[in-house]
Image (spheres, rainbow, N blue to C red):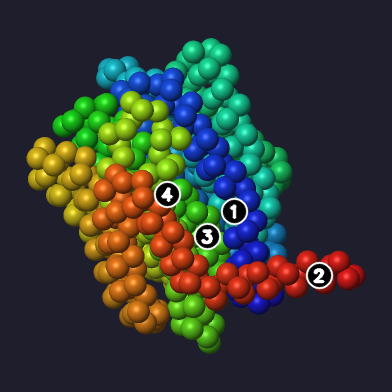
Amino acid sequence: MNKKKQLAKNTIIIFMGRVCTQLISYFLLPLYTSYLATKEYGMVDLVQTYVTLLVPIITLELEMSIFRYLIDVRGKKKDTKKLISNNFFVLGISLTIFSVLYLIVSSFVSIPYRFLILFDVIVCVLSGNFLQIARGFGRTLDYSISCILTGATTILSNIIFICFLDMRADGMILSMALANFVCSLYLFFRLKLYSYIQRSLVDWKLLKEMFHYSIPLIPNGVSWWIVNVSDRSIISVVLGASANGLYAISNKFPTIISSLTGVFNLSWSESAALHINSDDRDEFFSDIYNTVMKLFTAMGVGMIACMPFAFPIFIDAKYNAAYPYIPFLVLGTVFNVAICLYSQVYLAKKLSKQVASTAILGAVINIVINVIFIKKFGLYAAALSTAISYFVMMVYRHIDLKKYVTITIEKGLVLKSILIYLFAIILYYQNNLYLNILSLLVVCLYAFFLNKKFLLSSYQTIKDKFFSKKKA
């Protein structure tokens, strides 16, 4: 199958599953903001923040290694069994050690939602690992179905726990954990992972090789945590849990872009790994980069233009103070799209150390800006620190990656992007209905013309397929 078509097919399948989960989380925003006080929402957000920190440390980023190595052994059952057996061996030891240490520490230190957090961490580790195995097998449809199950479980359990049982913050955490548990259970039996586990296949040499790939990704994972969510920890300490609740809400909308980036990234990582040594690699990678960046640039500026109309619909009035920070967080998220595209090229070449070093750079910048300016500028400092750290990482990776792969940015794309974002952001802060409508119209036209070639090509492909089936 043509490289682009295969990438598009995988992206669509994954998108169908992931978008269900993500859309549900946004439809639940009115529920969360109505039933939970800003302080409660801030606490739950902080819990999830620390869960995302713990997972890559506990797993030693083995899920990324298992995905990459499974691609290389597709169709080789014996090698696949060996990889899966080693994977489960490490998971068992890691989760046992973590659970024992956690229970000891939590006996001496007061941790809110103590057992819920432990359950949440364990099922997050398992679901994350099994999802990567599904991708490694090339089972994108099963990956997608598991995401749909996760989304359905999330919405049903949230309604039951928060609305009917009045469990509030506890209910929200339990819902997230339960959703990951259902995902893990489905994939374990659907992929028949139990049939691959064989204790005699544990191979220390193979484990050493897998850890050589995955361990450099631990500081990368921790650094991403720092860039993405350390803001929340600093905000909670300096400004309080209520401020963190506001910041979490302002982050919710840019997270739509992050989620869609993640969807594309899952299929892109596979394509990058499969075609990293192709003769037309630079041309293919440059084409994908420019197409994706134009789409997400338009999506980001479109989100800024839509916010004056969407925010009051989804968010309760007591969270209105979250509104001003959204443009800077959107901008940072668009920079992150480029970073993710570059990351998968590094990982396709198995250059995990370079991924880690650039992520650490971003983390340091993020912390320094927050520590120096958050007292004076409040949540603006947190939003700007994220955008600046992402921008620096994007530029650094673009320059550094030239040692291995040449990705050429389309002429004029950067200048056009700067001008449209300035236009949209300036009108965003005017709080004027007519100017907001003008902004939305101009941005829609810009988005169409920027992506005209891609949109027309996609339309023609769908049209040809539809009519060819109808004639048949």
Q: Where 336 falls versus 472 (above or below)?
A: above
- Where is residue 204 drawn, in percent x and y? 49, 54
Specify few, some or many for label 3: CA neighbours under 10 Å numbering under 14, 14-19, or 20 or more.
Answer: many
Q: Where 125 falls versus 317 (above or below)?
A: below
Does label 1 or label 3 sit earlier along the sequence? 1
Numbered disc 2: secondary structure: helix
Q: Amino acid at mark 1?
A: Phe
Instruction: Using the numbered discs, state the Cα–Cα distance from disc 2 to disc 3 in whole angstroms.
Output: 27 Å
Toward the viewer: 417 or 332? 417
Residue sitting at x 76%, y 69%: 465
Specify few, some or many for label 1: CA neighbours under 10 Å numbering under 14, 14-19, or 20 or more.
Answer: many
Does label 1 or label 2 sit earlier along the sequence? 1
Q: Which mark is residue 264?
A: 3
Does label 2 or label 4 sit earlier along the sequence? 4
Toward the viewer: 62 or 294? 294
Q: Amino acid at mark 3?
A: Phe
- Residue at image mark 2: 467
- Residue at image mark 1: 15
Does label 1 or label 4 sit earlier along the sequence? 1
- Where is residue 111 drawn, in percent x and y? 32, 21
Q: Is residue 75 left or right of residue 257?
A: right
Specify few, some or many for label 4: CA neighbours under 10 Å numbering under 14, 14-19, or 20 or more.
Answer: some
Numbered disc 3: secondary structure: helix
- Where is residue 64 drawn, in percent x and y? 48, 55
**Is mark 2 in CB contact (under 8 Å) with mark 4?**
no
